[in-house]
Amino acid sequence: MHIYSFEKLEVWQLARQFRKEIYIITKSFPSDEKFGLTSQLRRAASSIGDNLAEGTGKLTLKDKARYTTIAFGSAMETVNHLIGSLDLEYLTEQDYTLLRMKLEVITRLLNKLHASQIKVVI
């Protein structure tokens, strides 16, 4: 099996696992949120890895950095949805804290990746 470059990125691997956890935890959300918060949270979490994968297919480092920035924005959107989920009591404080800690690792790695892409561009 061929391994694409994005699959080798630690940040993509963590984003992949994070997406899985989001899908599992949102199964317990109320059914009337299926097309609301559940969908938005899943899409935002999925978008982190999606944009990393798409960015590796770009030719220039500037374009790659742009997709890393978009992935970071998706992580921030995910934080916002997690806060809303906590406020609505769809998440326990413990689950919320654990997911936030995992996102902090992902965002630190996204920042490092972005910095490496920008250094070469300048």
Image (cartoon, rainbow, N blue to C red):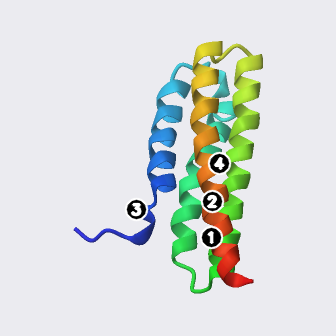
- Quadrant housing the N terminus: bottom left
Alpha-carbon span between mark 3 and mark 2:
17 Å
Which residue type does callout 1 highlight?
Ser
Disc on res. 7: 3
Q: Earlier in the sequence, mark 1 or mark 4?
A: 4
Q: Helix, strand, or loop for circle 4?
A: helix
Discs 4, 2 touching: Cβ within 8 Å: no
Judge whether 106 appears above or below 98 on screen.
Answer: below
Which residue is tagged 2? Answer: 112
Q: CA distance from mark 4 to mark 3?
A: 17 Å
Marks 4 and 2: which is nearer the front? 2
- Disc 1 designates what residue? 116
Q: Are marks 3 and 1 in contact (CB under 8 Å)?
A: no
Residue at screen point 75% across, 83% down: 122
Q: SS of the residue at dot 1?
A: helix
Q: Which residue is mark 4?
A: 107
